[in-house]
Amino acid sequence: MDLELINYNLRGGAEAFVRESDRAYYSQIEKLAEDMIRGSAERPVILICGPSGSGKTTTALALERLLDGSGHETHTISMDNYFKSMTPEERELYQRGELDLEAPARLDIELLNGQLADIAAGKPVYIPKYDFKRNESVAGARLLVRKPGELVILEGIHALNPEVITVPERLFASIYVSVRTRVSMDNFVLHPERIRLMRRMIRDSVYRGRSFAETLDMYESVQKGESRYIMPYKRRAHYEIDSFIAYELGAYRKRLLGFLRENARLEDVRELMEAAEAVDDGIIPPDSLIREFIGGSSYRY
């Protein structure tokens, strides 16, 4: 998508363009929800996978809201809550930026699959909660009981990995979410992974107590993890969603531009960010996917 066209639309009516951009994302989820409803009896579990910063969580919650509204009660679980507490050795590696944060081994795979099996069978389970600021797992944080006919969404970066999710394939439908659209300016094209990086930097600062620099320092490791743990399995997805929001560069401008001007590693991002028309927070709806990263969402993450 051409950045000048985005800017032109924002100057011509920012609120209308913001609504139109969010609508383009939600229309994908609405079409997908129709299929989930048709297959709900055979596939009560919905797996949502995608790389970090792809908008998996908002997609899961938006899908849940649509399914609930259609009379199909749905429960959403984040795979992040099955991370194991960091050991002292892992904490040392983390401080040095040497811990593979994306590795499946960081998950309590046995607990995850045991609880998925119990949920599918209608047995009560206590879902854990992972505290990212303390890097610790809190056991039994939430009781979940799936009643007959209800659906369960599990979202996480390893949701399509057959070594992580071992429940029978006949029980689930699967969705791959990521930024697919490229933003261009003149002869320059910004790769979608850079947009996901911007999202991560802002989200980690708002919710996980990490500085922009700390998130950027982990960027190479995260990319390696995606290539190793996510990309090989994305073709297993039954559906795909492009989570790009046309106005998002403008929404991130005031948050990131100062840092970008001081950091030569992100010169490509800086050039487009400087050219992007700024978008005021006040016109971004509370249910926008952008709110997953900047805060103020109507969804409970």
Image: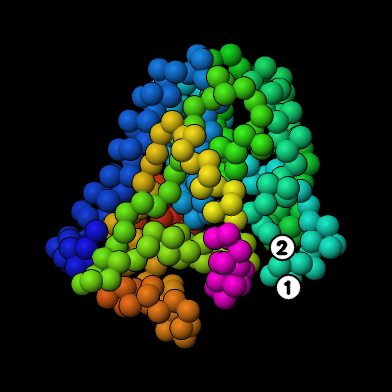
Q: Position of residue 283 (x, y in %)?
A: 31, 58
Q: Evaluate if marks 1 and 2 touch, with contact meaning CB atoms under 8 Å apart.
A: yes
The secondary structure that dominates the magenta segment is helix
Callout 1: SS: loop
Residue kind at label 2, given as amino acid type? Leu
Q: Say which of 41 and 187 sits in front.
A: 187
Question: Residue placed at 71% from the left, 53% from the top?
Answer: 131
Q: Mark 1 to mark 2: distance in Å?
A: 8 Å
Q: Position of residue 150 (x, y in %)?
A: 54, 20
* Magenta-span inclusion, residue 39: no
Question: Residue placed at 28% from the left, 44% from the top?
Answer: 23
Question: Residue placed at 55% from the left, 47% from the top?
Answer: 230
Q: Say which of 159 and 246 sits in front.
A: 159
Q: On the picture, is 34 further left or further right than 4?
A: right
Q: On the picture, is 65 further left or further right than 31?
A: right
Question: Residue placed at 34% from the left, 66% from the top?
Answer: 190
Can see residue 66?
no
> What count of labels does the image hold?
2
Query: Start and end of the magenta stretch?
Result: 210-224
Q: Position of residue 241 (x, y in %)?
A: 38, 41
Q: Say which of 171 and 137 sits in front.
A: 171
Residue kind at label 1, given as amino acid type? Arg
Name the mark on residue 84. none
Label 2 sits on residue = 99
Callout 2: SS: loop
Q: Identify the coloring.
A: rainbow
Label 1 sits on residue = 96
Q: Where the N terminus falls, by quadrant?
A: bottom left
